[in-house]
Amino acid sequence: MDSQSHYFDEDPTVPSENFTVDLVLPDLTATLRTSNGVFSSKRIDPGTKYLLQHAPLPDGTVKTALDLGCGYGPIARTLCQRFPEAQIWATDINSRARSLTIENVGKFGVNVEHPDDIDESIRFDLIWSNPPIRIGKSKLYTMLDLWLQRLSDDGEAILVVQKHLGADSLSKWLDKVSYNVQRLSSKSGYRLLKVTVK
Ligand SMILES: C[S@@+](CC[C@H](N)C(=O)[O-])C[C@H]1O[C@@H](n2cnc3c(N)ncnc32)[C@H](O)[C@@H]1O
């Protein structure tokens, strides 16, 4: 990615160059298509892997789930594996990321949409996200609040955030606005946070 490009650009200008990466988890091995111009295109991001290895399965039935900021879709692919009965959405502002996610999980019936196009009435039982910290605190908090408000009554979100990129200040802010935040685990500089509505 050149110095002017960001993984969160709506329409990356860097020419696309395609690769594949292997997602290897205890319950899933999948080869995913990626490209430059999207987040962590050459390997599964270690934070994402941490989330996928440690996120607990919720107690209740998951009927609706969201991969928030899907990139090329490793989280969405894992949601398909773990919640085969659920209706799953994946969203990203980056158009190339959405196209790759369609290639990687479209066959499982995942709804891959621009954030503005997801029906506002949908409530999610589960949101998993490796959120885009690099967009800046203000935009990040606005984005998270928008989607966390769409949790169903017993819904929960699991977020992975690097400690040195503001995991603790994010927790404090979430608690201050209207969410319960539980730190599920912390290892190798990552925090796994469970967020529910107060
Ligand atoms: C840290 S990356 C994670 C990507 C992918 N889930 C993974 O684990 O490889 C965060 C993603 O959020 C996306 N993003 C940035 N702003 C967004 C917004 N307002 N709404 C939805 N997605 C956004 C970025 O384009 C990026 O793909």
Image (cartoon, grey):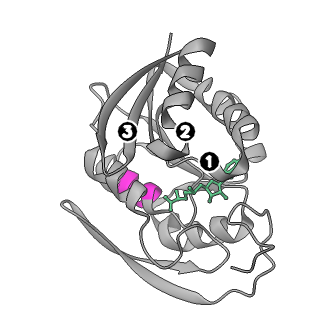
In what element is the residue under mark 2? loop
State the image coordinates of residue 31 (x, y, percent, origin top left): 37, 78
Q: How crowded is mark 3: few (under 14 residues within 10 Å), some or many (20 or more)?
A: many
Q: Residues within 10 Å of mark 2 (few under 14, many from 20)?
A: few
Cβ atoms at labels 2 and 1 below 8 Å apart:
yes
Tag 1 residue: 133
Q: What stretch is highlighted in magenta?
A: 75-80
Measure how far apart labels 2 and 3 are at the Cα level: 12 Å
Please say if 151 is above or below 188.
above
Q: Which of label 2 and label 1 is nearer to you?
A: 2
Residue farthest toward the top in the current orientation of the protein: 198
State the image coordinates of residue 142 (x, y, percent, origin top left): 73, 32
Residue 162 visible to an observer of this rendering:
no
Question: Is ligand 1 less than 8 Å from the beta carbon at label 1?
Answer: yes
The three-letter amino acid code for the residue at tag 3 is Leu
Measure how far apart labels 2 and 1 are at the Cα level: 8 Å
For residue 187: magenta? Answer: no
Secondary structure character of the magenta stretch overall: helix
In what element is the residue under mark 3? strand
Tag 3 residue: 192
Task: Identify the image quadrant of the N terminus.
Answer: bottom right
Cβ atoms at labels 3 and 1 below 8 Å apart:
no
172 or 140: nearer the eye? 172
Tag 2 residue: 166
